[in-house]
Amino acid sequence: MLKFKMKFLERSFSLTPQDILEKYYGYTEFRPGQKQIIDQILAGQNTLAIMPTGGGKSLCYQVPALLLPGLTLVVSPLISLMKDQVDSLRDSGIHAGFINSSQSWEETRQILAAAANGELKLLYIAPERLEQPGFMERLQHLHVALAAIDEAHCISQWGHDFRKSYLALSSILPQIQSQPTIIALTATATTEVAQDIMARLDVPPENEVKTGFARPNLAFKVVKGQNKNNFILKYVKANRNSAGIIYAATRKKAEQIGAMLQKAGIKAAVYHAGLPEDVKKKNQEDFLFDRLSVIVATNAFGMGIDKSNVRYIIHAQAPGSLEAYYQEAGRAGRDGSNAEAILLYAAQDMQIQRLFAENSDADEKHKEVIYHNIQSMVNYVNTQTCLQKFIVNYFGQDMEDCGTCSNCTDDRQETDITVTTQKILSCVMRMHQRYGRKLVAQVLAGSKAKRVLELNLTELPTYGIMHDTKANQIEELIDYLTASGYLTMPDPQYPTLHVTQLGADILRGQGTVTRKVAIIQNNSANPEDSELFERLRALRYELAEKQGVPPYVIFSDQTLHEMCS
Ligand code: ADP
Ligand code: MG
Ligand code: ZN
């Protein structure tokens, strides 16, 4: 054994990262960020690597693993995929093993013994295992040179996939005597999450390596107001020869779409956590090896799956966060050829996500994050800026408009909606920023809904000033204004609307607001009501004129002052 170890060490010193890349992987060039990350690791610097899905994160720790004397511990939440990853490493001639809950203690003991003998370069491990009593002691017999934390966002409560066992890593890792270098990797970190990861894993801020988030070959589309089943059926039939993934929020929905496609003669299968292991495995493999063209799945499918020729991802329902969406959508077009990421949206989809949140056992702080994440998704579907730019901005970067998304290619006329915006914002102010979108819309539309009457909201000067627009269209406008940053919901759990600084400027008459859809007039409005509203409106106009302000800017100076200070 010692002989083997010596041989390995010798070899390690004479090889460069470039040699490893060519020899073990057969690639000629590093992708953006990879070389820098590898160099930092080899220099013993703790590093946070943020690269998009498919960007090539695995290689960033595998290459150093082959160069460093000692073992690389890879912490990964993906028990189901560990074996596949380890198998594929072994196929490339890399000595790797894994430890997870599917194994007996005897198996674990053997693997640890192999690691202690220097027979392994990489050891994949589920985070729960590290927490088990006695495990740390066993680990101390190994010389761990590098600890790679894959999917590192799981450590942060601000992330979309927080896991308690990950949190424990911040106290466990420093206990390892050999004091390994730490590399944390993730595809989805907002600035907040990144800072959290760095604090917990002791990564200095200058050691964050972030590559571009933009995926130029992906065309993002948001489709609203269509029959989803019809859309999916038509799309899949038209793209019969391409591989695609359809994501649904629930198992039931996934089953239903899967059955619909199969009935239409499409080679489709379903994948979710409720299926037996062997069925899941078969469906996954059939998809990977192109025996299926479509897989209909819940979010249980995809993490770590490396199928390069996926041409489209359709979300039949929106996931619970923009991070999750980008990660799932990012599974299309890994080969660099054009691909589409389509989100079929209906407002009630977010209800499902809110329901998940309400029924989850998350604590208050975490629930807040969940609601915040849901709102980021709502903002995404309601924005009219470039969709990819919107996402990239969300992750704290900037880019030019992509030119291919459904917003970039939307050729409808821009309409000036400044006055409408002022009406909405002043109504929010008049309601003391204490109510949600639905009630605000009802007040503006002049609704006689029970709650409006109960709360005496008919007395408000903004009551009915948009009576020619339907309440649900006003709600849409409110969503658009929220997505565009004129309104905000600071406490997403109780989604009360607040006017932002940007909104306050619009109220003061500074700046204009545009939107690419004409505001549809409500033709079915009761003519008598209309007359009444017209009279009321005329009165307000008269009053406003006397005061020298436009009639829709209905707010007290004091409120505005408070808001802006
Ligand atoms: P991530 O974990 O960032 O989502 P992976 O590590 O799974 O991505 O890599 C995605 C794919 O890119 C894999 O097939 C991998 O072999 C490939 N890849 C990684 N680095 C390179 C490179 N330098 N050149 C070509 N292909 C690469
Ligand atoms: Mg990965
Ligand atoms: Zn775009």
Image (cartoon, rainbow, N blue to C red):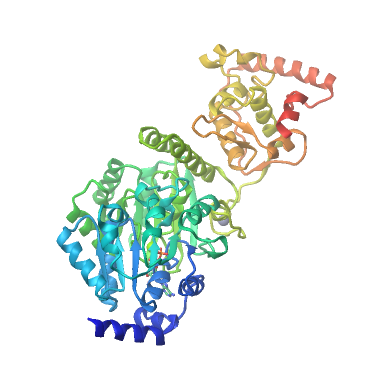
Q: Which of 400 and 41 is in front in this view?
A: 41
Front in this rendered view, residue 415 or 479: 479
Is 383 displayed left or right of 265 in the figure?
A: right
Q: In which quarter of the image is residue 243?
A: bottom left
Q: Is residue 492 above or below residue 328?
A: above
Residue 416 shows in the view: yes
The residue lying at 36 percent from left, 62 percent from top is 176
At x 70% / y 38%, what residue is drawn?
A: 501
Residue 414 is left or right of residue 274, and the answer is: right
Quarter of the N terminus within the rendering? bottom left
At which x and y percent is residue 84? 26, 65
Q: Quadrant of residue 545 in the image?
A: top right
Q: Is residue 425 above or below residue 395?
A: above
Residue 23 relative to residue 484: left or right: left
Q: What is the tally of numbered marks visible in this picture?
A: 0
Is residue 551 visible from the viewing direction of this image? no
Quadrant of the frame with the C terminus? top right
User: In this orientation, which residue lies closer to the viewer: 286 or 145?
Assistant: 145
Tell me where residue 162 appears, x and y as whole percent. Answer: 40, 47
- In the picture, measured across the screen, residue 318 lies left or right of residue 511, that is left
Name the quadrant where ligand 1 sits.
bottom left
Q: Position of residue 563 (x, y in %)?
A: 70, 31
At 39% across and 60% down in the image, what residue appears? 150
Residue drawn at x 57%, y 25% is 435
In terms of image quadrants, where is residue 560? top right
Q: In this view, does 161 lie above or below 147?
A: above
**How far across and down, in percent of the image, does residue 515 sit?**
64, 42
